Amino acid sequence: MTPVALVTGGNRGIGLGISRRLLTDGFAVSILATREEPTEVLTELRELAGSDDRVRYVRGSVAEPEDHERYVADAVDAWGRLDLLVNNAGVAPSVRADLLEATPESFDRVLGINLRGPYFLTQTFANRVLALRGDLAALPEPPETPVATIINVSSISATAVSTNRGDYCISKAGVGMATQLFAARLAPEGIVVYEVRPGVIATDMTAGVTSKYDALLADGLAPIARWGRPADVAGAVSILATGQTPYSTGEVFHVDGGMHIPRL
Ligand SMILES: NC(=O)c1ccc[n+]([C@@H]2O[C@H](COP(=O)([O-])OP(=O)(O)OC[C@H]3O[C@@H](n4cnc5c(N)ncnc54)[C@H](OP(=O)(O)O)[C@@H]3O)[C@@H](O)[C@H]2O)c1
């Protein structure tokens, strides 16, 4: 059976890298994003998959719980199973503002998309996996291989402060706690949960701050002194998504060129 992956924001940037990699790994991939159907990207992905039937696109917002139901139901109706959720979609604050000036509106927008959204999408996904799993629920011991996997894309900002985007940092720190919460709750159900924590990755999100990070990288920001690429994050997702780490859950996988290592 073809394993089924849901990748939020899988049409651009890091998410597109993840969609490409999962298709190469043999998954069917359904993407949730806000914009109108991105025809060129979907054509590329379907060519990569070698089939039109392995790629779906649902237009909606991860911030809207009613879209969660629609998104998950669409994949189950099409493919009859769920194996992987990658909570990748996320936004930076529209304006970087100092902690003493940032607005509640920005806080609500960023937290709504980056934290509340994946938190409740995970709830919807997990409940549907349990419903699909049926009789397995009666098994007295955890299964040898995960029944399903959830991967949250957080950020180095989960631990590194940026005083001009506190809302973003708090949303990603919250994703770290959500990872541990769902890992603990879902382990008895055979579902494993991981956090992938990127550093500085070249995408639309960072396009406006290229020169800033060029200078910081030249100045030693990360031991591996280059920008990360979506494919770097996708490689970590691929390892965690393909059942190779069945006795680990709640883990953080850094994809940041070693930036998180405290150095003197
Ligand atoms: N780039 C970095 O350096 C970096 C570093 C650490 C962590 N991250 C995290 O990695 C993830 C992906 O970032 P990226 O750099 O690839 O960003 P990006 O290039 O700006 O792409 C963001 C993706 O999220 C989707 N999205 C945004 N709001 C959404 C919503 N309300 N509902 C559904 N989809 C939504 C976008 O869909 P549309 O096309 O419809 O807008 C797009 O596919 C984010 O969670 C980000 O915080 C990025």
Image (cartoon, helix red, strand yellow):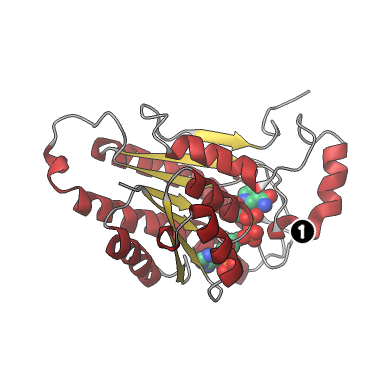
- Report the front residue among 16 and 124: 16
Look at the picture and state if 140 lies above or below 64: above
Rendered image quadrant of residue 90: bottom right
Residue pointed to by mark 1: 207
**Front residue of 239 and 108:** 239
Looking at the rendering, which quadrant does residue 144 occupy? top left
At horizontal 57% and vertical 38% (from top left) the residue drawn is 235
Amino acid type, callout 1: Ala
The residue furthest front is 50
Does residue 121 appear left or right of residue 24 in this picture?
A: left
Residue 67, how many percent across, how many down?
39, 70
Q: Residue furthest toward the top? A: 264
Q: Is residue 228 visible?
A: yes
Please provide percent x and percent y for residue 167: 61, 58
Q: Residue 248 location, x and y as percent? A: 40, 29
**Residue 89 in view of the camera:** no
> 232 and 114: which one is in front?
232
Quadrant position of ligand 1: bottom right
Which residue is at 55% across, 51% downward?
20
Left/right placement of residue 259 relative to residue 208 reads: left
Q: In the displayed structure, does residue 24 sit left or right of residue 40? A: left
Image quadrant where one finds the C terminus: top right
Relative to 52, does residue 2 appear above or below in the rendering?
above
Q: Where residue 65 sits: x, y (%)?
A: 38, 68
Q: Residue at x 31, y 63 (%)?
A: 78
Q: Residue at x 51, y 41 (%)?
A: 237
* Callout 1: SS: helix
